Image (cartoon, grey):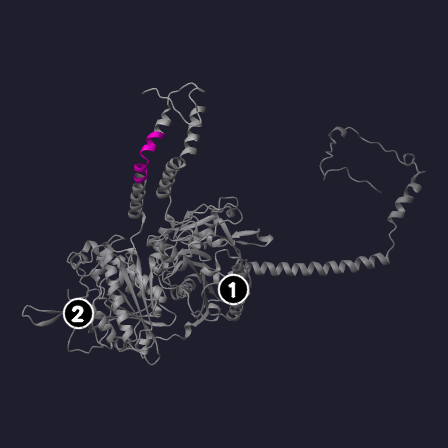
Amino acid sequence: MARTVEVTPYEYPNDKPSYKKSEFQQLLKILNTYKTNIAVGLITIITLLSTIRLILFRPTTYYTPDFSRLPNVQYFDLDHYTGSPDGWQRDERVLFCVPLRDAAAHLPMFFGHMRNVTYPHNLIDLAFLVSDSSDDTMGSLEAHLKAIQSDPDVSMRFGEIEIYEKDFGQVIGQGFSDRHGFAAQGPRRKLMARARNWLWSVAIKPYHSFVYWRDADVETVPPTILEDLMHHDKDVIVPNVWRPLPDWLGNQQPYDLNSWQESDGGLQLAEGLDEDACIVEGYVEYQTWRPHLAYLRDPYGDPEVEMDLDGIGGVSILTKARVFRTGSHFPAFSFEKHAETEAFGKLSKRMGYSVVGLPHYVIWHIYEPSSDDLKHMEWMALEEVKQKEEAKIRKVYDKVWGEAFDDVQIAWKKERDDFLKNTDMTALRKIEVDWSDADGFDIDANKKDEHIADFNP
Amino acid sequence: MVYSKQMIIRQIRRKPLLAIGPIALLLVLYLFLFRGSDSSSSTSASSKKTKYSYEKKGRGWFSKNKDSIILQDLPQNHISHYDLNALTTSANALENKEQVLILTPMSKFLPQYWENLNKLTYDHSLIELGFIIPRSTEGDQVLKQLESAIKKQLSSLKETEKWKKITILRQDSDSLKSQLEKDRHALSVQKERRSMMALARNSLVFTTISPYTSWCLWLDADIVESSPTLLQDMIAHDKAVLSANVYQRWTDENNKPAIRPYDFNNWVESDEGLKLASQLKDDEIVVEGYAEMATYRPLMAHFYDANADANTEMALDGVGGGALLVKADVHRDGAMFPSFPFYHLIETEGFAKMAKRLGYEVFGLPNYLVYHYNE
């Protein structure tokens, strides 16, 4: 390489010793001479890359008909409604299903939760099924809905709301023990399943991406429940459901035992039962030894932890709408020896969908006392009344005692010394003390209940 | 070292465009390779306040959603009230103004099918139509034909003659490639094909069934001839599930027009069939019409008697989807087309089994014919 001298308006060769042109400078020079070529090359690369990207990443688009001028013809591409983990950012609609029966008492609490829901309200379509109600569930529901839909804050208002009425003829009472007794489970489950199916099958539209099931009697639930469940990107997902208990029962307890993983014991039990039998979890009659979602809870565990399930409970289920669309439902017959939500888990799994539970993410069901609890509570109530009564009597008694008798105890304490000071008892009686045991006479001052007997004549 | 640094700065000052070049190249490379189609992947600072970001994400320029507008003209603050107790399904459906939903999974469009459908004499304003179209380029073709048929018809019809509503869906799952007659019936592809078909049928029925629907009629896209009173005739039987006998017109060896049985999925269970099923593995299915699997089931297709009463009923255990009338309640109770072996049965045959498990009875009309297209 020839030794050259650079002359620029800023540098004079006389000021500085001449130097070898740096490699970088040479590179720049080359770049400079071929700049047009480089520019053309860049443009070519960009076009090439974008074409490749289009071919690789772009989904093939299909023909879309235009029926905009025909109001009674609709076209939907179901592929647009398969549900993504960030649905709330993509305008994905959620069908919020709530089966109601004699639930008027729970509705104020339920709508309190609904107001707090952070998922964009306009993307939530509500569907209620009111069945076999003897209280004013319908009236109360309509009043609450009207209130929330005419809220001055438009973001409070929900999307489409549909209320369905259908009676299935409940043969079983709605008391806690009526509902949760073992014998009642099979037929009750099958009826519940029918009710649930009637609700979703009429409510679901082609444009729903998710279906969320929620019981009205949930007491505590995070306002972000939909996002919390959705971002896991599972086909069917349930949180853990517990319930608070009164102090005398130990404060808290797992509520929903229908979320479980299948076990060999369970399969073995199922094999031995007849076709229409219906296994229900949480009853001693059927011992399945299945791992339950509820019992795996760690209050300090990571709420993101997932657990594969086979059967699920119905208190709060988020599913992709595709699961229901393609035919999974709450079997109102014995499917693999289960019915309703437990069988829904099994059926969805059979159809190849993922069924998952979150052991450390908990929502709280209300506490409804069982009949044993009620008995105990009655006893406690009676006891309280009795104690109050006793306290009253004591008060009167004390008063009477105080008025009828003079307490001379304090006066005697003062006078006693005066009485005794001149009395030397030793003259009357010879007292000998045997001190031989004194060493064994050891009292620990720190122990409360051990002290020398108080001698106070 | 210091000197070369100065040089770089100087160069940039002198020819700024040259420096921008490489930086731009890097940026472009990064953007094209590592970013998805989302226009904004925001990890915004607002996420500190709330757990999730609520910024909207677009679908990109190319996959824009051009489906029908979702919510429109909703009454009374979007609250609607339906009393399903008042819904009836009765033999005299027309008098009770009961609504019918006609469902067709459509993988090819036959003008004869469309003509035959339009000839039905049941009050069109009580009929909703539902179509589901495969996700393939063949599906595009079908959709275009269907679109033009609907547009042509609606422009010529009077308001009262129009269908109450038409819903057209595009299947979300990919369809099987080949729908040729020969491949379609190969035993090895039967299970997969019918499983896909079951998914399509379920997607169709459950998204289109409305709170007013009393009856569902499954009518295959290749049923090209039926009585115009098909609906009234079948509804009159007042059965939960009722299947018509599917035949095909052809010209026999003597070049005379004749008919032959087509759909063999309408059958009564046999001891041999049950025995065969009990020997199968959990994920295997029994299908009719294959020599490999002799079930000896009495097939309704063979019970046709031209001289007998068309209203003769026979109890069935499996049904086909050619022309199948179902009370909407059966679907609402959860009866669907299993896409997996359900008691070793799949699709429409599995549906019949599920309806029976739910306590419904399944019947067929051996002497009441509808005709399949002859390929």
- Relative placement, left or right, of A284 versus A444 is left
* Image location of residue A203, percent across then percent down: 40, 65
Magenta stretch secondary structure, dominant: helix
Chain for numbered disc 2? B
Residue that carries the numbered disc 2 in the rendered image: B247
Q: Which residues are magenta?
A: A28-40
Looking at the image, which residue sits at the far bottom?
Answer: B95
Residue at 31%, 37% in the rendered image = A36
The quadrant of the rendering that contains the N terminus of chain A is top left
Q: Is residue A217 visible?
A: no
* Label 2 Cα neighbours within 10 Å, binned few <14 / some 14-19 / many ≥20: many
Percent across and percent down for residue A395 are: 78, 58
Callout 1 and callout 2 share a chain: no
Residue A359 coordinates in the image, percent (x, y): 47, 48
Return the residue at label 1. Answer: A175
Q: CA distance from mark 1 to mark 2?
A: 56 Å
